[in-house]
Amino acid sequence: MNATSHVQPLYLRHTRPSSSFDAKVARTLDHLRLAADAHPGQIVQATSLGAEDVVLTDLIWRHGLAIDVATLQTGRLHAQTLALLEQLPAHYDALQPGATHRIAAFEPETAALAAWTTQHGDDGDSAIRASIDTRKSCCGVRKLEPLQRLLAGRSAWVVGLRAEQSTDRASAHWREEDPGRDGVLRLKYSPLLDWTWGDVWHYIDQHGVPYNPLHDDFMPSIGCAPCTRAIAIGEDFRAGRWWWEDAAQKECGLHVHDDASAAPTVSALPD
Ligand code: SF4
């Protein structure tokens, strides 16, 4: 299946935008502009290519904001996600003739991945499900270490967290001081924090944003192929991620801190 350019997203039939949708879009754009101005040449959107992230990329590229875009190519992504990785820059290149759009893809470090696969097998799927430590070590090699390279030399990053995605994310903030595993303190911006699922899909529809067709297969949250499944109606939004694990463990570590003393410091953005 190819990445969908956009016809009638499944979720549009089940969601409505907030009454303040237009104001939210305008405010989000203001926040992105503020972030870009505050970190010239040092700010990057870390995109998972999920619905929230394609909205952010659209805002950044449509409005020519000086924010780079990068992703983690873990080596275990769905074919549809990889197709979208190609489709998105091509879509905006066609929309804006003369402009070049790029999503930098950060892959696992070769030696670390070889060591992991020697221990757990080429895909390691059974090992990932048998032990949370092994699963986290896979996320460490395929996501956390590449994330450090993605963030190297950056003073800020932009992510697509929304408060309604999970209890943990409900306590996130628009802008946080984020202590990285490399010891560098960066600002992390979550400009979609108060967006609803309906807001996200109405933006995608309104602007014809290419999105991952797996969303139409009841996968609201898409990660690596072995660790993502479709959810049933009524299931929690992130029930399809690492579904064999306890809910409290369901993060890959990109947005959590091992050391509680390294918890983010919050600062408010202007309304
Ligand atoms: Fe490995 Fe699954 Fe984590 Fe992807 S999400 S890095 S496959 S454990």
Image (tube, rainbow, N blue to C red):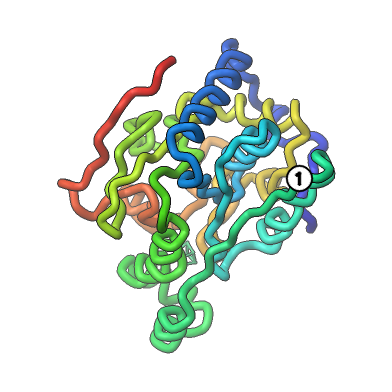
| 198 vs 80: above or below | above
- Nearest the viewer among 88 and 120 is 88
* Residue 49: % across, % down: 61, 49
Q: Amino acid at mark 1?
A: Ala
Whether residue 264 sits left or right of residue 9 in the image: it is: left
| 88 vs 136: above or below | above
Image quarter for residue 60?
top right
| 21 vs 230: above or below | above
Residue drawn 33% across the image and 66% down it: 132
Which residue extends farthest top? Answer: 19
Whether residue 261 sits left or right of residue 10 in the image: it is: left
- Disc 1: residue Cβ within 8 A of ligand 1's nearest atom: no
Image quarter for residue 208?
top right
Quadrant of the frame with the N terminus: bottom right
* Residue 81: % across, % down: 66, 57
Residue drawn 60% across the image and 21% down it: 25
Residue of label 1: 99
> Does residue 126 appear anywhere in the picture?
yes
Which residue extends farthest bottom? Answer: 118
Quadrant of the frame with the C terminus: top left
* Residue 264: % across, % down: 26, 40
* Residue 59: % across, % down: 64, 33
Residue drawn 46% across the image and 38% down it: 161
Whether residue 109 sits left or right of residue 259 in the image: it is: right
> Does residue 236 appear anywhere in the picture?
no
